[in-house]
Each structure stands twice: as C-alpha cells, then as structure tokens.
Amino acid sequence: MKKFASVALLSLGVLLAGCSKQESAAPAAAPTPAAAAPAAVTKIVVGLDDNFPPMGFRDEKNELVGFDIDMAKEAAKRLGVQVDFKPIDWNAKEAELSGKRVDALWNGLTITEERKQNIAFSAPYMENHQIIVVPADSAIKTKADLADKVVGAQEGSSAVDAVKKEEAVFKSFKEFKTFGDNVTALMDLSAGRLNAVVVDEVVGRYYVAKKPDQYAVLEDNFGTEEYGVGLRKDDTELLGKLDKVLADMKADGAAAKISEQWFGKNIVK
C-alpha cells in the first residue's frame, strides 16, 4: 500500500506540475508608446482679402498694410511666432481655413451664428455697422428709399447677410448685385451703375473720407456686428493664447495705438 500510495502521489505531482505550466499567465503586452506631443506652432498663415482698406490692402509699393495687418503682426510678436499673410478669395475663406491653406482669417471678419458652426472665433476686438453709401447728390435718404433701386455689396461679406435679413427691404430692391470686392462696387456706384452700396462701416467711411464730394453715408444702416479672428475649431490651444494676447494688447494700450494710427481714435472693443 505504501508503495502504491507513493506512486499515486508522484503521478499526481507530475500532473499538477503539468497543469501549472499550461495555465501560467501569458507575458504582459509591451506598453503602447505615448502619442507624440503636437509640434509647437512656429508660424501662422493669415488669410485676407487684400483689397479691403483700411483693414488689409496694398499700398503704393504693393506692400500689405492695414489695421488688421498691424494687429496681427503685434499679436504674432507676443506669441513668439512668424506671421505670413496670404491673399485669398474671400468668398472661399472657410474652405481655405478648413483645408489648412491658411491658419487664421483676420481681415474684418464678422462674427455670426452661421459662421460659428465652422469657425472658432476669438473674443470680439471691434464693433462695426453695415452702412449704406450713396452718391453725394442722391435723393436716397433712408432704407425705404432703396425700393426699386439697384444695390450692391461684396460677395461673401456679412453685408449680404445683413441686407437679406431685412427681407421686406431686400425684396423691394430692383436688383441686388454682388462684387468681388468693395472697391469695384464703389466704382460702379460712382459710374451710376448702382444706386447704393452696403458696406462695412470701417471700409465705407475710409473711402467716403477720401472722396467726400462723391459719396454720402445714410443715417440708416443694416445693423451692428462684431469683428473677431477666425481659427479652425480644433486649434483650441492657439485660440486660448490669441485671446490672452488680444486682451493684453487692449489692456496695455497697444491696440488703441494701432487704432489711432488708422482711424484717428480708439475704436477697439
């Protein structure tokens, strides 16, 4: 019996040892490498309409100048990044931004609920109105006088949205024409092909001041709006840094100084 028991116990030990070997845990999987941190931003490409004075345009030397140009340069300096300016078709601005051909839209860009669906906006930095410019000798004095008249605006601009929002007035026009830029629209106004142009106040008053004998601005307008810098929705880190820089520029007077250079007063919000 002892011999049989010893054999039995030996067999059982071998069996348990075999089971233990088969059921041992598999080697732990190698840890997944941590995702690389996103590369630090060293350059920002700003998309703009280069025929939008005084916000962004070309001077007599064909160099890009303007209020928004100077604001962007100061902001980039404080962010420690290079800034490049790229003229784009303003009517395709959202496609340029989402396609990563530009990193920011900074050129009198009006903040609207519709645009917020595809664009992340900075805090507003300027308030604007959509004004009505007419020939200096025009009989048009109010929005009601635009009935049966030919009215123009820049294609893709917030002026178009502002006009169409006032449906009764819009439907009273004889024709509503859009142009590639405000300069061309104002040229058509001077040539008599338009009766009025709806345009951003900062732009309209800039041209009216240059030619006060040709243009007049009505007291009526198509509403108040705010300008902001547009970024891609996933550029949250850059947006946060830009908002801080803009707030600092307002607080220390740098934004006011740039505004006074271009408008003769501080109109920064």
Image: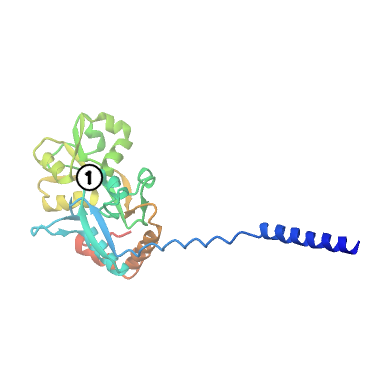
User: Residue placed at 19% from the left, 41% from the top?
Assistant: 197
The answer to whether residue 248 is above or below residue 156 is below
Residue 174 x/y as whole percent: 20, 28
Residue at the bottom extreme of this rendering: 252
Q: Quadrant of residue 125?
A: bottom left
Nearer to me, 61 or 260: 61
Instruction: Answer yes or no: is residue 135 visible.
Output: no
Residue 249 figure quarter: bottom left
Which residue is located at x 90 percent, y 64 percent? 2
Query: 21 or 93: which is nearer to us?
Result: 21
What residue lies at 30% left-to-right and 65% top-to-bottom?
42
On screen, residue 183 versus residue 121, left or right, reads left
User: Which residue is most to the right?
Assistant: 1
On the rendered image, what quadrant is the C terminus found in?
bottom left
| Residue 202 % position (x, y) | 23, 52
> What amino acid is found at the position of numbered circle 1 in the picture?
Val
**Residue behind mark 1:** 199
Q: How is the image coloured?
A: rainbow
Q: Please tell me which residue is depicted at 26% across the width and 51% down the height of the picture.
A: 101
Q: Residues within 10 Å of mark 1 (few under 14, many from 20)?
A: many
Image coords of residue 27 (percent x, y): 59, 61
Q: Quadrant of the N terminus?
A: bottom right
In screen coordinates, is 69 left or right of 167? Answer: left
Give 103 or 212, whichever is nearer the viewer.
103
Determine the image quadrant of residue 132.
top left
Q: Relative to 236, is 113 above or below?
A: above
